[in-house]
Amino acid sequence: SALYILVQAMAVKHTMQLLPAFVFALALVLRASAAAAETIHLKFYMHDIVTGSPATAVQVIKGVVPLANDPTTYFGDMYVIDDLLTEGPDAASPAVGRAQGFFQFASMTEYALLLTANFVFTAGSHNGSSVAVLSRDVIFDTVRELPIVGGTGGLRGATGYGLLRTHSANTTTRNAVLKIDMYLRV
């Protein structure tokens, strides 16, 4: 009937008038919720030991195409890691966890790795938690970014990034100490 159509039209008009206010209120709620997320800064050092005892980075796949500037490194070389994480650059400084995963030479033309690792924390306020990283690591760049793709325990659902810097490296042994600053939103 005409009265029903008129009532429906008025309801639609009233709803359309309220829609901008509703969208604005929803945006404020979402912004406040994002601002309430805790930001955590973690700083630690990763000890990547390829040559030595105990080795914490072990080659499990040997590629077949050598890199242009290094006949000892091959596209496709893969290493599994279980690297010590410490508070300071010295391996004797207090342990905070382990980096467990792998890296693979993923470029035929440069020293670029695919790094996939879980940073498992075994001490301090994040004991029992972990952070997952999936990243491209151009190892001779001064600073490399590590996207954080998740977390567990107290860091469940973490997002953010890490900044990776080479603290020290030995090109003969291929051992390295890496400084990592992680900025997490939980």
Image (cartoon, rainbow, N blue to C red):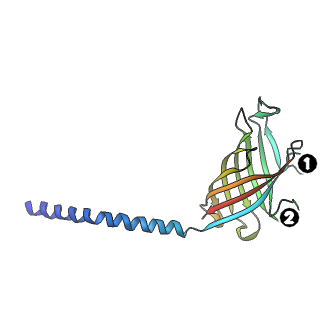
Q: Quadrant of residue 149?
A: bottom right
Residue type at tag 2: Ser
Task: Find residue 22 and report its horizontal and vertical position in percent.
Answer: 34, 66
Residue corresponding to mark 2 = 93
Residue corresponding to mark 1 = 52
Residue at image point 87% right, 46% down: 170
**What kind of element bears circle 2?**
loop
Q: In the picture shown, does residue 150 fall above or below 29?
A: above
Residue at image point 63% right, 62% down: 184
Question: Which disc number belongs to residue 173?
Answer: none
Q: Is residue 50 left or right of residue 144?
A: right
Name the foreground residue: 143 vs 31. Answer: 143
Q: In the picture shown, does residue 58 fall above or below 24?
A: above
Residue at image point 25% right, 64% down: 17
**What kind of element bears circle 1?**
loop
Q: CA distance from mark 1 to mark 2?
A: 19 Å
